[in-house]
Image: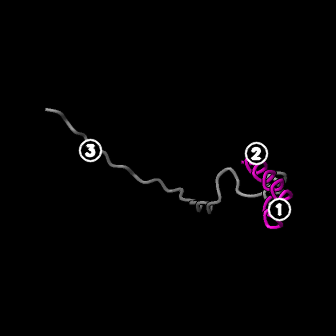
């Protein structure tokens, strides 16, 4: 993901310089900065971490035997 951000950001910076576009330059700078400093979403995505459950109790499982005829 870092390589993709770096490539897209680099392309945006080059195009911003060619077209003298400040907004694209800012977006390209942000993308390149995210790639260089390893910022942004981690490998698990941008989701909310699942709550941790500390249930140490085990439930008793009941089995029923089935006999064939």
Q: How far apart are marks 2 and 1 (CA)?
A: 18 Å
**Percent position of residue 55, x then y:** 53, 59
**Dividing the image into 4 quarters, which one contains the C terminus?**
top left
* Mark 2 or mark 1: whose residue is earlier in sequence: 2
Residue under pointer 1:
25
Point 84% across, 56% down: residue: 18
Q: What stretch is highlighted in magenta?
A: 1-29
Q: Pick out the residue farthest to the left.
A: 69
Looking at the picture, the colour scheme in use is one colour
Identify the secondary structure beneath mark 1.
Answer: helix
The answer to whether the residues at label 2 and label 3 have Cβ atoms under 8 Å apart is: no
Judged by depth in the image, the label closer to the viewer, 2 or 3, is 2
* Label 2 environment density (alpha carbons within 10 Å; few <14, some 14–19, many ≥20): few
Give the x, y percent position of residue 9: 78, 54
Where residue 32 sits, quadrant-wise, is: bottom right
Q: From the viewer's perspective, is residue 65 above or below residue 13?
A: above
Residue topped by disc 3: 64
Residue 3 image label:
2
The residue nearer to you, when weighing 23 against 37, is 23
Mark 1 or 3, nearer chain start: 1
Q: Are marks 1 and 3 in contact (CB under 8 Å)?
A: no
């Amino acid at each position: 993901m870092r390589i993709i951000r770096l490539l897209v950001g680099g392309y945006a910076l080059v195009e911003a310089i060619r077209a003298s576009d400040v907004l694209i330059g800012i977006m390209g700078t942000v993308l390149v900065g995210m790639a260089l400093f390893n910022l942004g979403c981690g490998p698990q995505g941008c989701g909310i971490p699942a709550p941790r459950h500390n249930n140490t109790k085990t439930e008793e499982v009941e089995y029923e035997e089935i006999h064939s005829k």
